[in-house]
Image (tube, rainbow, N blue to C red):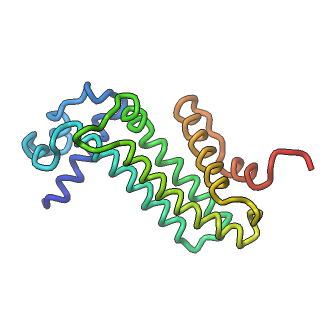
């Protein structure tokens, strides 16, 4: 097994072992066992548990960006593309939500990286991808061309985040298609 494979398995094991727990409840031994490697192997790839945690978060963020980029670059029509981007983002938010809250609440960072910078860079990437999707939708006549793209991106990200958090916290499964229709058609009487 190659070093990239071992590293990936350790990161995946960290995500699995950490789910539903606090970081201080997880031991490197547990992660190593779940990854099928020795504890020393974990330390070959990661400075400490904090570094492993932050690199796991970074991996999850990169996966989201890659998946959203894939949908954004697909040949779907703009309306279907918006729906698929929303579903992709929501799926990732629900997967990583616990870990992002943990990172923020416990003030993770320091010598192992800056979580705030990591999140800012991630949101800049998402904003750039979404800007392209919404510009395409405006050209196709799905969106009003006079709207500022930043405002539309903000609205879209906010509704997807809130939808995902409602699902995680309350089991409320609001269809993304309904939210998208509300966003595109409006809620007011004509």
Image check: 157 left or right of 63?
right
Q: Is residue 165 above or below residue 117?
A: above
Q: Is residue 112 above or below residue 145?
A: above
Considering depth in this image, is 58 or 91 the residue closer to the camera?
58
Image check: 185 left or right of 16?
right
Say which quadrant the N terminus sits in.
bottom left
Q: Is residue 88 above or below residue 75?
A: above
Residue shown at 52% from the left, 54% from the top: 88
Image check: 95 left or right of 57?
right
Find residue 55 and report its horizontal and vertical position in percent: 28, 47
Residue shown at 28% from the left, 30% from the top: 23
Quarter residue 99 falls in: top left
Residue shown at 46% from the left, 48% from the top: 92
Find residue 32 and report its horizontal and vertical position in percent: 15, 40
Considering depth in this image, is 111 or 98 the residue closer to the camera?
111
Find residue 60 and report its horizontal and vertical position in percent: 37, 49
Find residue 171 and report its horizontal and vertical position in percent: 57, 32
């Amino acid at each position: 097994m190659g070093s990239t494979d071992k590293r990936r398995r350790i990161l995946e094991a960290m995500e699995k072992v950490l789910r539903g727990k606090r970081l201080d409840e997880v031991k490197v031994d547990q992660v190593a066992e779940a990854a099928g490697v020795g504890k020393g192997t974990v330390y070959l790839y990661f400075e400490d548990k904090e570094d492993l945690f932050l690199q796991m978060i970074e991996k999850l963020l990169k996966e989201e960006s890659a998946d959203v980029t894939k949908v954004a670059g697909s040949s779907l029509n703009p309306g279907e593309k918006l729906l698929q981007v929303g579903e992709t983002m929501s799926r990732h938010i629900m997967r990583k939500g616990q870990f992002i809250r943990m990172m923020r609440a416990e003030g993770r960072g320091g010598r192992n990286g800056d979580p705030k910078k990591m999140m800012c860079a991630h949101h800049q990437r998402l904003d750039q991808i979404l800007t392209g999707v919404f510009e395409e939708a405006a050209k196709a006549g799905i969106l009003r061309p006079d709207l500022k793209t930043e405002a539309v991106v903000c609205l879209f990200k906010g509704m997807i985040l809130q939808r995902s958090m409602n699902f995680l916290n309350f089991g409320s499964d609001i269809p993304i298609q309904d939210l998208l229709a509300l966003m595109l058609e409006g809620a007011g009487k004509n």
